[in-house]
Amino acid sequence: MKKDNCRRYNLRVYGIYMKDDFLLVTDEIRFGRRMTKFPGGGMEEGEGTIDTLIRECREEMGLTPVNIRHFYTTDFYQETEMLVDKQQLISIYYTMELPDFDTLTLMDKAFDFPFREGAQGFRLLPLDRLSPEEFTFPVDRRVAEMIIAQKRLKR
């Protein structure tokens, strides 16, 4: 197969943390764009998926996740939105616990920080009012739908 015909993949790993009927999300500025998503990010060469989640949580929040369990892997075709060189996006989501979560600084409202590249903040969304539209990207919206459906089943 010719190299220019090879499909390129972009592997992303995200954590789902829920506490007291709230869901943790991150608001970020990347590529000059505001985005609301789950905490996590891109897999680096030589990493496994759980290694990626642990590294991302340490880098973004200074916290190490535990009791990590697979929740969802993208099961539909999705191209990356943020890259000029389009790639097939594969996102893997894990539920997790965050010891020392209470040490994380949280925002009361979305994007409560200066608009600058790389800025990031965390906040909690109430599960009883969770909407997929809160999220910027299609795969995160799909995961939000799954969380909402699970919440309804538990009632």
Image: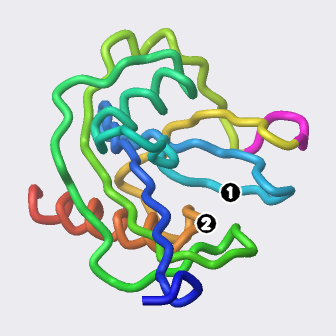
Mark 1 crowdedness (10 Å alpha carbons): few <14, some 14-19, many ≥20 = some
Magenta highlight: main SS: loop
Return the disc, 1 or 2, that comes first in the chain's sequence: 1
- Asked if residue 54 lies left or right of residue 96, the reply is right
Q: Position of residue 97 (x, y in %)?
A: 26, 27
Secondary structure beneath dot 2 equals loop
Query: Which residue sits at x=56%, y=69%?
Result: 137
State the residue lying farthest toward the left: 154
Image quadrant where one finds the N terminus? bottom left
Q: Position of residue 111 (x, y in %)?
A: 76, 43
Q: Position of residue 3 (x, y in %)?
A: 53, 81
Q: Which residue is mark 1?
A: 35
Q: Is residue 138 above or below residue 148?
A: below
Image quadrant where one finds the C terminus? bottom left
- Asked if residue 11 lies left or right of residue 123, the reply is left
Of 24 and 56, the residue lying toward us: 56
